[in-house]
Amino acid sequence: MAQLAPPTQWQNARDVSSEKAIKESAAQAKPMNEQVAAMMKPLPEVRPNAESSLYKKSIILFDGERYTLVPVGSVLHLPPTLRDRVIAKPQGDFTFWPDFLKRNSAWLAGKEVPLKMAQGDAKLAAIVFRGTVKSSRLLVSVYRECPISILQSAPEPEASAASNP
């Protein structure tokens, strides 16, 4: 069995505060309620900045009381009679897309689109757009019930540009 070092070597192993030093330190500290009060500041009512990147990349749909955000490029069809439903700055209370859609199903609909179309497939886009022209509702492209942007297909390189070195 290993022998322990004599107690004289352990005396300086760690610093120990005396009870008197602890009481003096505690007397100098602010009471807990003052410390908590200093940390707790009332929060001002903060509305989202309309110039933030989320708002720059979104279209704001408004029903007169509430608004929601859909990505730029997600509106497939916007009848002239519903143009006032698209606004420049948020008004009213924010509502998430599913609730906004249920609330405004008389003039708003989501059109499920294939993911390839959202990625820029022009052939699929042409087929879907043909079916949206006659709708009287504002149509938003959705993928799995969530609004999604439709990317424009990349332009074909011109033959004349390809022949010029």
Image (cartoon, grey):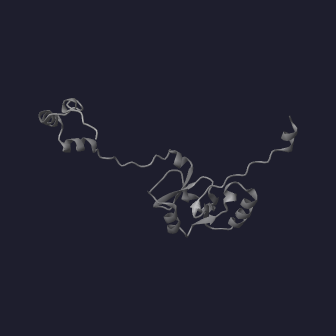
Residue 107 image-quadrant placement: bottom right
Between 50 and 111, the one nearer to me in the picture: 111
Q: Above or below — where is 97 with respect to 106?
A: above
The image shows residue 52 at horizontal and vertical percentages of 50, 45
Residue under the point 20% across and 42% down: 34
Q: The C terminus lies in which quarter of the figure? A: top right
Between 26 and 46, the one nearer to me in the picture: 26
The image shows residue 93 at horizontal and vertical percentages of 43, 58
Residue 25 image-quadrant placement: top left
The image shows residue 99 at horizontal and vertical percentages of 49, 65
Q: Is residue 58 left or right of residue 125?
A: left
Residue under the point 15% across and 36% down: 22
Tell which residue pokes out farthest to the left in this image. Answer: 20
Tell which residue pokes out farthest to the front in this image. Answer: 1
The image shows residue 161 at horizontal and vertical percentages of 84, 40
Between 49 and 33, the one nearer to me in the picture: 33
